[in-house]
Image (cartoon, helix red, strand yellow):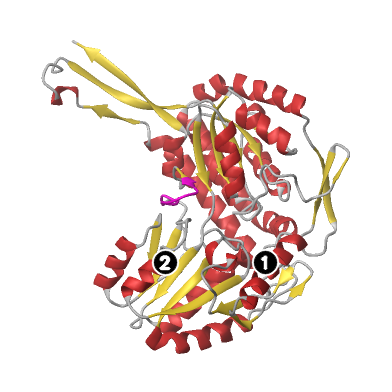
Amino acid sequence: MPETAIAESPVKAVAEHLVVRNKFDGGPLATLPQCTEAEVRVELIRAAASAPAAAAMPRHERGRILDSAAELLQQRSQEVAELIVAEAGKTIKQARKEVSRAVNTLKLSAAETRRNVGEVVPFDSFAGSENRQGWFTREPLGLIAAITPYNDALNLVAHKLGPAIAGGNTVILKPSQLTPLTAIFLVDLLREAGLPSDFVTVVLGDRTVAQTIISSKLVRMVSFTGGFATGRAIAANAGIKRLSMELGGNAPVIVFDDADIPAAVEASVSGSFWAAGQNCIGAQRILVQRPVFETFLEAFVTQTAALKTGDPRNEHTDVGPMISHDSAAEAKRKIDEAVAAGAKLLTGGTLNGPVLTPAVLTGVPRTCEAWSEELFAPVVLVEAFDTAEEAIELANDSEYALQAGVFTKDLNRALQTAKAIDAGGVMINDSSDYRHDAMPFGGSKYGSMGREGVHFAYEEMTQPKVIAIAS
């Protein structure tokens, strides 16, 4: 994930205000006030003071608000999709899909309010407790700080607000400085659906504001999606509170020689270049068994070169701009570094403002940043392997282990490989970038703490309370 949440914003601020710009043409979209450190302290006190009212709201009312917000979002889907295109640079097709996912995320959150209420505790399972009966409920934590990135400016905000509201919490939300308008749009919809205004507070500001939120004793949990350096800073400054972090990945996809090659190519092209590669589970390292390597590579390069780049408003555009000129230039630098070290650039890698044409590299040394670090750009590495053991060793050659993909017709080999890959999720006969918003989502190595996915985030954002009755 990108480093944007606590780091100083690359968007230019005018005095106390933040100018939000169109990511394709650079035109201004809005000028928004930013909070000072003193102002955010006031907002923290107000949000924490509202926590008892949020906890007291009946579950049916929480569910009604979330369902109503989902319905409103569906009704205004084209409007918010166009906002995502302008503010985040996603293509209109990708933006529409993100809206549909966010609708589902809110609906899943509404359902969670009505079913995940606790369990009966079998006290009589232990000798001496036969005269006791009871249960535990799931109770809100209180005030949750949510810090969200730019790459899924709507759905990743929904993934934090939906479960938090379902659990009866209040939230102080700090969206990316690059995409605050989409987050504000969603919060406004929730309020239109009936959510009291004090239950979710949006704040904008620099790293001082973020650090003030994170370190506050009024905050019971920090839920963060973003970059590794920022995650380390949060862990160092948060104090004693619950932390949930998703800090990105470097996803491998393994293609065995018995795979359906056309299907593997099509899925891998999409998985590599969706959202201009700014996708924490996007395919970055595609490992292909040697007997089918040339066949796969030729088809992959051909399909990649055919992708249309440019204006994300165009219905026919496949790859739009990256989030900024600087991000695109940094990705280009890593491509050039790999080529200088001996890699071959087979297609793409051309800069046109913030648009980087989809790039395919092969022969990348494992010492290069393109191999070892998360690129978060429309750049993919395709490398050959000989044995399953070698493929697994290459796939696991990363500190970051969010998701992976495996293509094979052999179910036994698929399951053995999935077991051996160290990742939070393994997609069989699909790219690494598949995600269903109800499934548990998170990594298994450095850079992940806790799980998202509505049910699992809800449990992270609530705590058990035991009631025991002695008779």
Q: Secondary structure at mark 1?
A: helix
Number of dots carrying numbers: 2
Identify which residue, 67 or 153, lies in the foreground. Answer: 153
Q: For residue 395, which numbered disc appears in the image?
A: 2
Q: Position of residue 68 (x, y in %)?
A: 57, 42
* 297 left or right, relative to 406: right
Quarter of the image that includes the N terminus: bottom right
Instruction: Give whichever of 320, 396 is nearer the camera.
Output: 396
Name which residue type carries label 1.
Ala
- Crowding at dot 1, Cα within 10 Å, few <14 / some 14-19 / many 20+, comes out as many
Residue 251 percent coordinates (x, y): 48, 64
For image coordinates 85% across by 36% down, the residue present is 16
- Residue 68 counted in the magenta span: no
| 409 w.r.t. 250: above or below | below
Is residue 173 positioned above or below 99 on the image?
A: above
Q: Secondary structure at mark 2?
A: helix
Which segment is the magenta one? Answer: 439-448
The image quarter containing residue 120 is top left
- Residue at 83 percent across and 60 percent down: it is 26
Measure the alpha-carbon separation of dots 1 and 2.
22 Å
Query: In percent of the image, x 63 and y 82: which residue is there?
Result: 347
Q: Quadrant of the C terminus?
A: top left
**Which residue is more in the foreground, 19 or 5?**
5
In the rendered structure, the answer to whether residue 130 lies left or right of residue 438 reads left
Q: How busy is the neighbourhood of tag 2: few (under 14 within 10 Å), some, or many (20 plus)? A: many
Identified by mark 2, the residue type is Ala
Residue that carries the numbered disc 1 in the rendered image: 331
Could you tell me residue 463's position as x and y percent?
41, 28
442 within the magenta span: yes
